[in-house]
């Protein structure tokens, strides 16, 4: 699912106010990180993650791996933060960041 630039703009606006839910460290993506990432995407649909790796290429590789393994789409990367999107089959109106901010 490719996002249009207007959709990305709206998602960035929502994601700007979010706090990082998942933190990926230099050890990489473990089963625990994947489990938490999957749970967060199921609950919130749009999440912010932090990648605490100083090397730019390694950081981008970890973000790409997280997107690939979780089935999420990358919305934006700024510094050590990334915003990911994966729409839930049955969104929870109380938890979904997309439902809370309407328009999606």
Image (cartoon, rainbow, N blue to C red):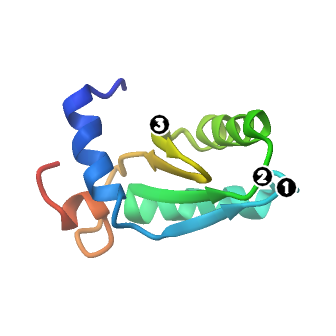
From the image, which quarter does the N terminus lie in?
Answer: top left
Residue that numbered label 3 is attached to: 73
Question: In 3D space, how far apart are the residues under numbered discs 2 and 3 (Cα atoms)?
Answer: 20 Å
Residue that numbered label 1 is attached to: 26
Location of residue 62 with respect to 19 vertically, above or below: above
User: Could you tell me which secondary element the residue under label 3 belongs to?
Assistant: strand
Q: In the depicted view, which residue is nearer to us: 46 or 6?
A: 6
Question: In 3D space, how far apart are the residues under numbered discs 1 and 3 (Cα atoms)?
Answer: 22 Å
Dot 1, how many residues are within 10 Å of its Cα: few (below 14), some (14-19), or many (20+)?
Answer: few
Dot 3, how many residues are within 10 Å of its Cα: few (below 14), some (14-19), or many (20+)?
Answer: some
- C-beta proximity under 8 Å, tags 1 and 2: yes
Residue 53 is at least partly visible in this image: yes
- Name which residue lies at 50% across and 41% down: 72
Location of residue 77 with respect to 32 vertically, above or below: above
Residue that numbered label 2 is attached to: 53
**28 horizontally vs 5: left or right:** right
Q: Mark 2 or 3 closer to N-term?
A: 2
* Closer to viewer: mark 1 or mark 2: 2
Q: In the depicted view, which residue is nearer to us: 64 or 60?
A: 60
Residue 50 in the image: state x and y as whole percent: 61, 59
User: Could you tell me which secondary element the residue under label 2 belongs to?
Assistant: loop
User: Could you tell me which secondary element the residue under label 1 belongs to?
Assistant: loop
- Name which residue lies at 36% across and 51% down: 88
Question: In 3D space, how far apart are the residues under numbered discs 1 and 2 (Cα atoms)?
Answer: 6 Å
- C-beta proximity under 8 Å, tags 1 and 3: no
Q: Mark 1 or 2 closer to N-term?
A: 1
> Which quarter of the figure has residue 14?
bottom left
């Amino acid at each position: 699912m490719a996002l249009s630039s207007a959709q990305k703009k709206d998602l960035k606006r929502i994601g700007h106010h979010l706090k990082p839910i998942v933190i990926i460290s230099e050890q990489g993506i473990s089963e625990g990180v994947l489990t938490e990432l999957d749970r967060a995407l199921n609950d919130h649909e749009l999440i912010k993650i932090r990648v605490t790796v100083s090397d730019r290429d390694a950081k981008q590789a970890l973000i790409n791996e997280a997107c690939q393994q979780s089935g999420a789409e990358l919305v934006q990367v700024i510094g050590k933060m990334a915003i990911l999107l994966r729409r839930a089959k049955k969104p929870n109106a109380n938890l979904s960041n997309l439902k809370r901010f309407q328009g999606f």
